[in-house]
Image: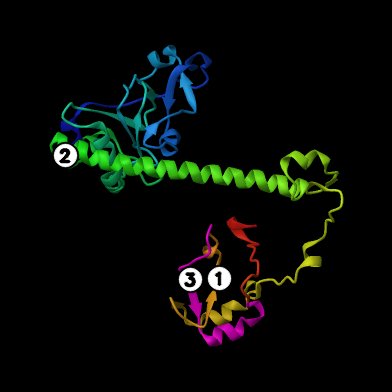
Amino acid sequence: PIKQIAQKLKAGGTPKRGKPEYYGGDIPFVKIGDITNAPTYLTSTEEFMTNSGLDASSSWIVPKNTVLLAMYGSIGKVTITNAPVATNQAIIAIVPKPNVYYEYLYFSLLYFGKNLVKYNIQSTQKNINKGIVSRFELPIPPLPEQRAIAQVLSTVRQAIEATEGVIAAARELKRSMMKHLFTYGPVSVHQADQVQLKKTEIGEIPQEWELKPLDKVTHTQTDYVANGSFASLRENVTYLDGEGYAILIRLTDFRNEFKGPFRYVDKHAFDFLSKSSLKPGDLIVSNVGAKLG
């Protein structure tokens, strides 16, 4: 049980809102959102509190290398403090005993903590409490094995974070290049100030470019099943997973990469939907719902 491996197990508290003297100080104030957005180590918080706020609430100074566990909403989310912080009541801090390595505790909760959700004590918002956390059991091998396990997982984590950093930088480069190319055209950054621009409703573009409606430069078609006629087909069509006459593209297929798994339809369904058949190279745009555009 966690209560047997923790030298301190305590939730925090929130100073009274509406008291400006309680906020804006030097003490990082951790909330659930800070944990869900944090990597392995907590690097930043949205809010800070003052010593007055600390004294006026049940919050306390959580030491460095403490595991923070979310008890409300995002049950089981964890992070490690890399500096002293204070937390609100939705977060419980677990200060491990000397025979428990804090990174091992983090990774074991990251893996086993998903089981905490089944102890949810409220229906409207998922909540657990200190009692549930204190009784929750984790496997605790000898300290050298804890460190070995944590070392392997830390190495993997560092590789993932490095890769994510490269991906984020590439995305930012892409956004920057798109802005440049669609504003100045295919010229170098040093030549941009030589390009004459004109203002349009979608922003500035090169003077010699034309702005045209999409239907003047493409052959467009609306999804044939969007008019409700698909309902009559739905009772007679057989969906096939992994093989079939043609792929049926759905909104759920709109992801960063269009690579499946897909649902297929038979020849009968394809003939019914032939007005919306597509060829390789066609552009598909979602025109409804949360994935609009």
Residue 176 in view, yes or no: yes
Residue 115 lies, in percent from the top left, at: 27, 48
Which label sits in the foreground, 2 or 3?
Answer: 2
Disc 3 on helix, strand or loop?
loop
In the rendered image, residue 270 lying in the magenta stretch gets the answer yes
- Identity, as a three-letter code, of the amino acid under mark 2: Glu
- Identity, as a three-letter code, of the amino acid under mark 1: Ile
179 relative to 239 in the view: left or right? right
> For the residues marked 3 and 1, what is the alpha-carbon distance in whole angstroms?
8 Å
Disc 2 on helix, strand or loop?
helix
> Badge 2: how crowded within 10 Å, few (<14), some, or many (20+)?
few
> Badge 3: how crowded within 10 Å, few (<14), some, or many (20+)?
some
Residue 199 lies, in percent from the top left, at: 84, 45
- Labels 3 and 1 touching (C-beta < 8 A): yes
Residue on which disc 1 sits: 249
The range drawn in magenta is 256-277
- Residue 145 badge: 2
Residue 119 in view, yes or no: no
Residue 96 lies, in percent from the top left, at: 22, 29
Which residue is at 52% across, 63% downward? 252
In the rendered image, residue 261 lying in the magenta stretch gets the answer yes
Indicate the colouring scheme.
rainbow
Task: Decide which of 283, 159 is in the foreground and name it.
Answer: 159
Residue on which disc 3 sits: 262
Q: Earlier in the sequence, mark 3 or mark 1?
A: 1
The number of numbered badges drawn on the structure is: 3
Q: Earlier in the sequence, mark 2 or mark 3?
A: 2
| Quadrant in which the N terminus appears | top left
- Identity, as a three-letter code, of the amino acid under mark 3: Phe
